[in-house]
Image (tube, rainbow, N blue to C red):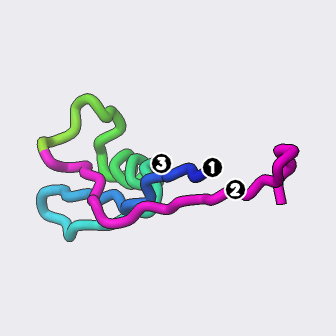
């Protein structure tokens, strides 16, 4: 069974700073907190966005008894 996961990078744009890309949302939120935006609900418009560039699919192979190979 294939399990697709969104692995697109997160883009953070803050006024007066260069845009930054992060692989994980947790990293992007930590960067925002370091720069004075600890609350996600009060972020400036367009400050945090997930790009649509990459998906990762993990394929699990099983035999007829259902045992993973």
**Residue at x 38%, y 65% (from the top left corner):** 54
Q: Main secondary structure of the magenta part?
A: loop
Q: Is residue 20 left or right of residue 5?
A: left
In 3D space, how far apart are the residues under numbered discs 1 and 2 (Cα atoms)? 5 Å
**Residue at x 58%, y 52% (from the top left corner):** 2
Q: Are marks 1 and 2 in contact (CB under 8 Å)?
A: yes
Q: Vertically, is 39 above or below 21?
A: above
Choose top left, top right, bottom left or bottom right for residue 23.
bottom left
Q: Is residue 34 magenta?
A: no
For marks 1 and 2 on the same chain, the one whose residue lies earlier in the sequence: 1
In 3D space, how far apart are the residues under numbered discs 3 and 1 (Cα atoms)? 28 Å
Q: Give coordinates of residue 27: x percent, y percent.
A: 46, 55
- Tag of residue 60: 2
Q: Vertically, is 37 above or below 24?
A: above
Range of the magenta residues? 46-69
- Tag of residue 26: 3
Q: Is residue 54 magenta?
A: yes
């Amino acid at each position: 069974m294939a399990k697709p996961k969104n692995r697109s990078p997160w883009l953070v744009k803050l006024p007066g700073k260069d845009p930054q890309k992060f692989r994980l949302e947790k990293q992007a939120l930590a960067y925002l907190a370091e720069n004075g935006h600890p609350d996600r609900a009060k972020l400036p418009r367009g400050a945090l966005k997930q790009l649509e560039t990459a998906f990762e699919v993990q394929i699990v192979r099983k035999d007829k008894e259902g045992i993973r190979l």
